[in-house]
Image (cartoon, grey):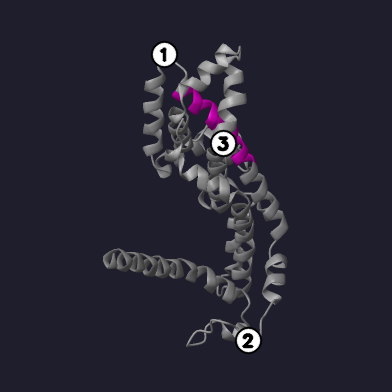
Amino acid sequence: MKHRKFKRLLTYIFISIAGILFALPFFWMISTSIKPNVQLFTYPPVLIPNPLEWQHYFDATTMIPFFTYFKNSLLYSGLSTLGVVVSCPIVAYSLARLEWRGRDTLFILTLAVMMIPFPVTMVPLFLLFSQLGLVGGLLPLILPLWFGMPFFIFLLRQFFKQLPSSLEDAARIDGCSEFGIFFKIMLPICQPAILTIALFQFMFSWNDFLGPLIYLSDPSKYTLQIGLQQFQQTESTAWGPLMAASVLIAVPIIVLYFFVQKAFVQGISLGSVKG
């Protein structure tokens, strides 16, 4: 009994230390965003600034076209998330529940594509979109996601495979078509999993730096992640506005997580779903 309590105490201590370590960069970012300039590089570091300097937040939204970049980031993240949510469940359901020739081969190919790192496909994709005349806008970033994301297809396929076949059999006996089984029965059941991949994709797109850096050349189409580098000048960096802009960029992700956290936790624990 004592051994179990001691083990639990060690677990709590380890989780607490890990939590503090993970939260420390975020705390430093918020602290720096409200520090007067004279306290930015003082030693020992000032953790809680006095007085609070809110001017950095005004500078963050005026030194760069912040709201234009915000709109572009929202457009990119929203449409790419919508593409993943529409395409991935259809492909995953087909690979998990429907019998058709070449299904297993296509699934192996999907897994193989998942193993290929992005830098390998970066140049061929750029040449392809360049030939199509799409480079310079957001379409090369959004369009591929409307054809599915291998990792999310894999996750959803595993979820669909765990559902009992009696659900489909009962629906067919009641006269439901294959489309009806998918849209009326399977999709509502896997709503937590879909919300989970939606949250992941929104985060990936919102924080994506490399993709917009490759394809976007018009400053009016930059996203927030590209816009952040404009706080870095040739001889100096506006650390206060940079940290304030970083805090503002993190806010939508945090708010979104609080809205979908219940479904997110359910989606992560897919293995517990039983018929």
* Residue type pointed to by label 3: Val
**Position of residue 157 measured from the top left corner of the image (x, y, whole percent):** 45, 30
Q: Are marks 3 and 1 in contact (CB under 8 Å)?
A: no
- Mark toward the start of the polypeptide (2 vs 3): 2
Instruction: Tell me what residue is drawn at x 58 percent, y 36 percent.
Output: 191
Which residue is label 2 attached to? 50
Instruction: Tell me what residue is drawn at x 63 percent, y 69 percent.
Output: 244
Which residue is label 3 attached to? 84
The span picked out in magenta is 79-96
Which residue is label 1 attached to? 101
Whole-angstrom CA distance, mark 1 to mark 2, is 69 Å
* Magenta stretch encompasses residue 256: no
* Mark 3, secondary structure of its residue: helix
Instruction: Tell me what residue is drawn at x 39 percent, y 42 percent.
Output: 117
Give the quarter of the image for residue 66. bottom right
Instruction: Tell me what residue is drawn at x 28 percent, y 68 percent.
Output: 2
Q: Nearer the viewer, residue 260 or 202?
A: 260
* Residue type pointed to by label 2: Asn
* Mark 2, secondary structure of its residue: loop
* Mark 1, secondary structure of its residue: loop
* Magenta stretch encompasses residue 82: yes
Main SS, magenta residues = helix
